[in-house]
Structure formats: structure tokens, C-alpha cells
Amino acid sequence: MAVKVAVVGATGNVGREMLNILHERTFPADEVVALASTRSVGKEAFFGDKPLKVKALDSFDFSQADIALFSAGGDVSRQWAPVAAEAGCVVIDNSSAFRMEPDVPLVVPEVNPGDLAGFSQRNIVANPNCSTAQLVVALKPLHDRAGIKRVVVSTYQSVSGAGREPMDELFTQTKGIYVNDQPSPREFPKQIAFNVIPQIDIFMDSGDTKEEWKMTAETKKILDPKIKLTATCVRVPTFVGHAEAINIEFDRPIDDDEAREILREAPGCMVVDKREDGGYVTPVECVGEYATFISRVRVDPTIENGLNIWVVSDNLRKGAALNAVQIAETLVARYLKKAA
């Protein structure tokens, strides 16, 4: 089935990656439209080598598209996703606007593709938070084998997860420090260059940040509501690639060798785990890759049935654009062709 695809937010970090990945994976689109705000109209976005003139979101007729990939922020999604859905276009939304609504599927295709069956209730499918996506890809096969009781995760999240301006701020601050130019934070609450910031998103009454709450709530919705999860989310001075140190407590015994073998066979996972200098994957090495990389698999002797793992993924890809495209691929393969 050839489909018409609209990419909303096509000039942003994730929007550009969506266009790249649609082309790389030869998505069956007979037309791709780049949409953005009026200030970006006339600019060029690229679908492979093909330039696309950016069109205005607020004047686009969504009845002319089958699927719309949204990555323009929650406010834009709340305003325009229902408009697109009402016009018969299936929306795959990368913002947090609809993730926790009970009639909107929250999907990672390697984990819960069956939930897509409910897409037609609203014609909207939600993409999870970038840190959640790579987490559940790694947890799913282990949960199937041994049943996860509790997860403790600490994240090391790159600045690209906050957008283009934060990337510029890291670059400017880093360069400025070398010439004794005192950093002046604007995009982050504190200096990000040569520093780490234990705050992503706003603080909630519980003391958790909203990012930490998202990881907990989204993991329960995607994977299993019985899983207990606590997170500490930290912004680090890398441009692309999120890393997570994950401690897992299981219902049933599982050792590191078995876990490694299970993860090697799991969809979307790539195990790189040699117990030697450099025998693991870091954020720099995951950039541009589709896989969720898993290293440092080892038994936690301080709890019964415990494991530690290290998980790294390109947050602009699996954490956002790739997951959205995979959702679109699954919709086309399983559902939209039946409705055509």
C-alpha cells in the first residue's frame, strides 16, 4: 500500500530525522509533505536527496494525507492532531500530549505492537518519551522470561533531547570556557558544559521531575502496570545519545549469561558486552544507529534475582523518529491496508 505522509515539525531535529528514516527504510510513501509553522514556509527540508519546500501547517488539508508524523511540541499537537485525525489522517505524535490518555495507544513496536489495534478510537497513536523507548526495548524480553518486579534507573541524557537551541548552548558554552568567557545559562537551569544537571523538565509535588514521572507512568502503560519503577534523570554534556544504568529485580531467577542470550535474540537489541577495556557502547558510538545497545550485563548480588545493565541509544532515532516510523510501518502492514 502506497501512502501519503505528512511530517509536522519538519525543520526540527526530530522532524529531519523522520524524513531521513522514512527514506532510509524505503517507507512505501508515494508522497511526503514537510509541514511547519508559517515562519518556516519556503525553507527546504530533505527526503533523501529530494528537497521539499516546507508548507504551512495551519493551511494544510489533512484529508490529503494518510499518516501524519507530529514532532512540533505538545501545544501544536493538542491543537492540530485532533484536526488531522478528524480529517481521516492517522496521527503518530511524538509529544507527551496524548500519551496517558486511555483511548490512545502508547506504542513501541518491539514491545506492544498489538496495542495499535486500538488506533481507530481516536486516529491518534502516541510515541513514548525518548528515555522510556530504549528502556522498554531492553526490559521487555527479560520481563517475558523472569517477570520484573522493580526497576531503578539513572539516565544520562544528551542535550538534543531538549531541542536545537540547547545543542547550540552546549556548543557555545564549551567554546566560551576555553577563552575564559563565563557561561550564561539560558536553555538549562545551570551551566551544561563540563557539568551534569539532575533535572529534566519541571519539578512535581513529589520531588520527582516530570521526566522521571513520564518514565514510570509510560513504562507501566507500555509494559506492565505491576512493575515498580523509580528514576533519576540527568542531563549530560553530550550532543546525541541517551544512556541508562538500570538495576532490575525479577520474580524468578535469571543470571547474566541467560540474560545476555535473551537480549541477543530480542528485536531491536544489540548486545556488546566484553569484560575488557572498551568492551561496551557509549553514546558517541550509537549515533546514527537504529539499535538499542546493551552492555555491562551483570548479576546484582545485593538483591535476590537482580541484574544490572547499561543501555545506550540514539535518542533522535529510536527515542523519537525511528519509533514513529516503525509505528507507521506496522500500521500500514497490519491495519491500513485492510481499511484501504
Image: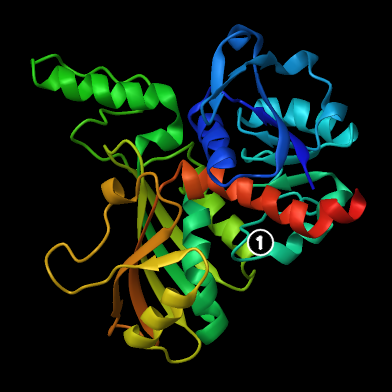
Q: Nearer the viewer, residue 160 or 289?
A: 289
Residue that appears at 26% across and 37% down: 237
Q: Is residue 68 visible?
A: yes
> In terms of image quadrants, where is residue 236?
top left
Q: Would you place residue 134 above or below residue 12 in this image?
A: below
Locate residue 288, reporting x and y percent.
39, 44
Residue 300 vs residue 131: left or right?
left
Query: Eyeballing the image, is 186 above or below 224?
Result: above
SS assignment at label 1:
helix
Q: Position of residue 196 (x, y in %)?
A: 26, 40
Residue drawn at (68%, 15%) of the image: 55
- Compared across the picture, whether 255 is left or right of 98 comes to left
In terms of depth relative to the viewer, which is nearer, 204 or 271?
A: 271
Amino acid carrying label 1: it is: Lys
- Residue in the image at 17% along x and 74% along y: 275
Find residue 171 and report its horizontal and vertical position in percent. 26, 24
Q: Position of residue 117 (x, y in %)?
A: 81, 60
Q: Residue at x 56, y 37 (%)?
A: 18
Looking at the picture, the colour scheme in use is: rainbow
State left or right for residue 58 relative to residue 223: right
Vertical position of residue 121 compared to residue 280: above or below = above
Read off the residue under disc 1. 221
Q: Place residue 306 in its image quadrant.
A: bottom left
